[in-house]
Image (tube, rainbow, N blue to C red):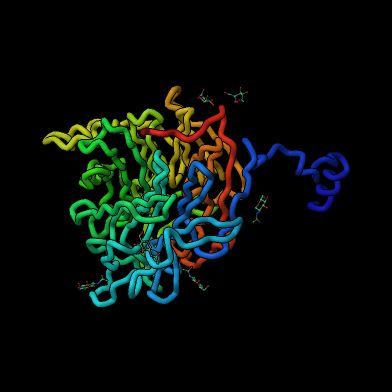
Amino acid sequence: MYSKLVLAASVLIPTFSSAQQLLRDPGVGGPPLEIVHLYNDQWPTGITVSRSGRKFSNYPAGLDSNNTNTGSNNKYQVAELTGNSTETPYPNVSINNPPGGAVNYTTTPPTGANYQTHLIGVQSVVLDARDRLWILDTGRAQLPDGTLVLATYGGPKLVGVDITSNTIIETIVFPPTVAFPDSYLNDVRFDLRASVSASGQGVAYITDSSSEGRNGIIIVDLGSGESWRHLDSIPEVRAERGFVPYVWGQPLYYIPGPGQPLTTVPLGSDGIALSADGADLFFGPVGGRGLFSISTQRLRDRSAMSEVLAQAGVVYRGQRGVSDGFETDSNGYVYAGNMEQNAIGFYNPANGSMGVWVRDPRISWVDTMSVASDGYLYFTDNQLAFSRSFYPGTDRRQRPFVLFKVKLPGNGTRVSLV
Ligand SMILES: *[C@@H]1O[C@H](CO)[C@@H](O)[C@H](O)[C@H]1NC(C)=O
Ligand SMILES: *[C@@H]1O[C@H](CO)[C@@H](O)[C@H](O)[C@H]1NC(C)=O
Ligand SMILES: *[C@@H]1O[C@H](CO)[C@@H](O)[C@H](O)[C@H]1NC(C)=O
Ligand SMILES: *[C@@H]1O[C@H](CO)[C@@H](O)[C@H](O)[C@H]1NC(C)=O
Ligand SMILES: *[C@@H]1O[C@H](CO)[C@@H](O)[C@H](O)[C@H]1NC(C)=O
Ligand SMILES: *[C@@H]1O[C@H](CO)[C@@H](O)[C@H](O)[C@H]1NC(C)=O
């Protein structure tokens, strides 16, 4: 009976076997991705591109124990991309080699080393509008078993580098009341306009994405070095309870450390971008799909009612998808990865909607984006979702990791708030 039916079908409806004629997801869309750099050595997150086209990346010890400097393995936290697949420790080798390594094993349990003069665990590198390179050090590193050690004073800092002389010009160390031992300083944006700070030297805005949950936004006066927090632990900066994102068809559950029970994705406010006019700061957690903003004036305010006013000023802009870093261009668009769609999307504040800009099956994890003066958006894809921090806990990443670039729409280019 069964074989007779199949026979009948094949005779009467021959096109049944032509499944390729059914409508299907094309999987690609938008302008093409161009490969700029292949990372065959350490595992990267950040990318930033200077006016002259120099490129810098970072390789956080806090997310990959193979990036942790042991004092003798020469692992680096920041590098300049010196060829299509070669990297040189930056600004020099010694800054990337804390004496004795990134972890202080004389404490119980081990902690992040307290060097103000060396890099411990760098989560992002960003060039400001004057083309100074800022290195954001979490002060935290992973042990070989995957334990993320707590930071100690001196580790969490913002380090400014003059890329002409390749020397450090400023080091802002965060007090433990601003960068808690379990904070995870994630990403940073700059506004150098004189009017926005008491010192006249501009401000930085930083996300604290800590998987331990004390999330918030940190504000820094670049002239005085003073820093403070706002939006501490409000729902909009935290991961949503029960949040399960999907990458390449796989649900992501998180492994907080060796032997610990799985959780849903606990990563808080991570992506950050200023509106093109500097008036609003956009942010969103990895553990959620929401896009939020707040007036930057509310963040800079430190008066008695400033936290109450800041919390009242958070705006929900809708759903962006699952993303890591954000970026802005001169069109005013705010770009964000949309990992569940193998895509990068953008929010247009002018019409309040999200669009999908590019799709490509090579996209798994859009970590960091950087709009450059050449009219391209550069972004790293580092397969973060396949690392051992996610179920089943084996390292499924495959080298090379990649830096792509894509031509921006409408002749978009870098925004300079100066
Ligand atoms: C670190 O590198 C070693 C040697 O290449 C590899 O076996 C191991 O899986 C890596 N660990 C992680 C967490 O990537
Ligand atoms: C890097 O790639 C570009 C574009 O494919 C190519 O023109 C250039 O020769 C390459 N440079 C090196 C050093 O391989
Ligand atoms: C390691 O910890 C000890 C004890 O707190 C402290 O005295 C020492 O300065 C620390 N060293 C580094 C490099 O962090
Ligand atoms: C590395 O850079 C630091 C800060 O700019 C400088 O003090 C130090 O002398 C440099 N070290 C080497 C070996 O170039
Ligand atoms: C909003 O603006 C963008 C950019 O012009 C456009 O691509 C998008 O389609 C608009 N959204 C809607 C819903 O019209
Ligand atoms: C982009 O620039 C080109 C060359 O200057 C110009 O012809 C074109 O009209 C511009 N496009 C937009 C959308 O502004």
Residue 344, image x, y percentages: 53, 40
Residue 157, image x, y percentages: 29, 55
Residue ranking furthest to the left:
304
Residue 303, image x, y percentages: 13, 35
Residue at 51% in and 50% down: 55
The quarter of the rendering in which ligand 6 is drawn is top right
Residue 28, image x, y percentages: 64, 41
Please tell me whether residue 159 is drawn above or below residue 318 in the rendered image: below
Please tell me whether residue 304 is drawn above or below residue 56 in the rendered image: above
Residue 261 appears in view = no
Which quadrant would the C terminus be assigned to in this image?
A: top left
Residue 320 appears in view = yes
> In the image, is 264 to the left or to the right of 305?
right
> In the image, is 358 to the left or to the right of 199?
right
Residue at 22% in and 61% down: 153
Please tell me whether residue 72 is drawn above or below residue 222 in the rendered image: below
Residue at 41% in and 76% down: 72
Residue ranking furthest to the right:
11
